[in-house]
Image (cartoon, rainbow, N blue to C red):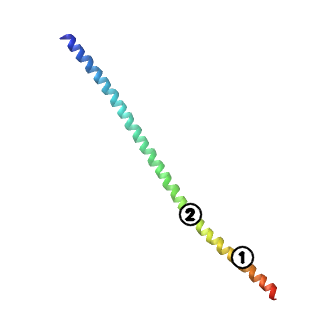
Amino acid sequence: MDSQMASVMANHATILGNQAEIELSIRHQHQCIEDLKREVAAFRAIVHEVRDIMAAMHVSFAVFKYIAIVGAAIVSAWHAIKAAWKAFW
């Protein structure tokens, strides 16, 4: 009976040791997943900021484009009026 009890106790100790290692691995994996979630949230915030900046730049580039078109039209009209003024007077 002593030999069987020693065998059972040894198996029990091995199982408890394995369980402790598994628990440690699961805690480590959980911590890694939580760190990854924090990193993803930080990257998501950065992506939203960049997206907002790009949208603002898109709007300002559209405004600048129309300002350039209107400016070019005014300059060309001015040169046309000046050329007509010199030609007729």
Res. 23 image quadrant = top left
> Residue 8 at what x, y percent from top left?
23, 17
Residue at 58% over, 66% down: 60
Task: Tell me: residue 33, above or below residue 11.
Answer: below
Residue occupying the far top of the picture: 2
Q: Callout 1, which amino acid?
A: Val
Res. 36 image quadrant = top left
Q: Residue beneath label 2, please?
A: 58
Q: Earlier in the sequence, mark 2 or mark 1?
A: 2
Q: Which quadrant is the C terminus positioned in? A: bottom right
Residue 75's tag is 1
SS of the residue under disc 2: helix
| Gap between marks 2 and 1 measured at Cα | 25 Å
SS of the residue under disc 1: helix
Q: Is residue 24 left or right of residue 80?
A: left
Task: Tell me: residue 18, above or below residue 2.
Answer: below
Res. 10 image quadrant = top left
Q: Is residue 69 left or right of residue 48?
A: right
Task: Tell me: residue 31, above or below residue 22.
Answer: below
Residue at 45% over, 46% down: 40
> Residue 75 at what x, y percent from top left?
71, 76
Residue at 32% over, 25% down: 18
Q: Callout 2, which amino acid?
A: His
Task: Tell me: residue 35, above or below residue 73.
Answer: above
Q: Is residue 50 left or right of residue 3?
A: right
Give the class, few, some or many, for how many residues have Cα within 10 Å of label 1's Cα (few <14, many ≥20). few
Q: Which quadrant is the N terminus positioned in? A: top left
Residue occupying the far bottom of the picture: 89
